[in-house]
Amino acid sequence: MGKLIAILYGAASYVVFLIAFLYAIGFSGNLLVPKGIDDGVGGALVPSIVINVLLLGLFAVQHSIMARPAFKRAWTKFVPKSVERSTYVLFASLILLLLYWQWRPITTPVWDTTNTIGEPILLAVFAIGWLVVFLSTFMLGHFDLFGLKQVFDNWQNKTADAPQFKSPGFYKLVRHPIMTGFIIAFWATPVMSLGHLLFAVVTTVYIVIAIQIEEHDLVKMLGIAYVEYRKRVPALIPFTKFGGGGATPKDTTPKEMASEPGE
């Protein structure tokens, strides 16, 4: 019964994620959703900025803290390991839905390419960004990333495999193609309002900071293979040195990393 409940919980969490993910496309592009990033009646500028930053900050805190190995070790004393990832995904998705609901539009235009050649170009780039995000999740392991594999492995009494280094598809070009796709999608808009600009700036800054934290954990988990990968492959921008050449953490030698199976 417990395993069945875990599967139902994992599936429900995944459905909530899909709703939040698909709505994010419409929200950021002001497309086919009840409320886009520029929809609604704008309020006073300063309160709107504060509320929007707090909403983005809430997502950033949850998304970062719950992903840390130390938090996972403490969290799984209360939550079964089989649904730990699903719970993480569910919380992140619910916070995104809260953000869409409570977002305060700031419609002052920064640029507007409507009825120019720039509009179809930016819409195409926007679509490419989201396509990169979607395809990258499958290259990494979509159902593992969003918790479904864990609950089905639990149903079948399978033990999770130890983390292994791999760099399929887009991961040969950049270390974080999902984040590259998000940045492309958030900035490629035919009409950039002040509110959209705030959203794009804050999410980009968060992505850059979060990558540094995540990679510290990845080095410890995957060892010298990831250290060498960081030296070869840039973090976000293909064919550049941006984010490349990562150093080994001072408290972890290559020998130690190679011997650690990960967390």
Image (cartoon, rainbow, N blue to C red):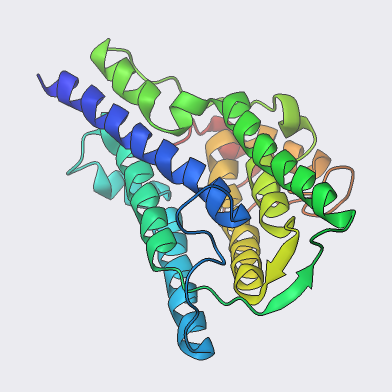
Q: Is 154 located above or below residue 99 in the figure?
A: above
**Residue 9 visible in image:** yes
Horizontally, residue 19 falls left or right of residue 236, namely left
- Give the number of marks: 0
- Residue 228 is situated, as x and y percent measured from the top left of the image, at 75, 37
The residue lying at 74 percent from left, 37 percent from top is 229
Q: In which quarter of the image is residue 204?
A: bottom right
The residue lying at 59 percent from left, 28 percent from top is 140
The residue lying at 64 percent from left, 64 percent from top is 200
**Residue 227 visible in image:** no
Q: Is 67 located above or below residue 4 in the figure?
A: below
- Residue 153 is situated, as x and y percent measured from the top left of the image, at 33, 16
Horizontally, residue 156 falls left or right of residue 138, namely left
Which of these two is toward me, 133 or 263?
A: 133
What is the residue that sits farthest to the front in this orientation? 115
Which of these two is toward me, 210 or 130?
A: 130
Which of these two is toward me, 6 or 186?
A: 186
Q: Is 26 located above or below residue 45 in the figure?
A: above
Horizontally, residue 110 falls left or right of residue 2, namely right
The residue lying at 84 percent from left, 43 percent from top is 238
Q: In which quarter of the image is the C terminus?
A: top left
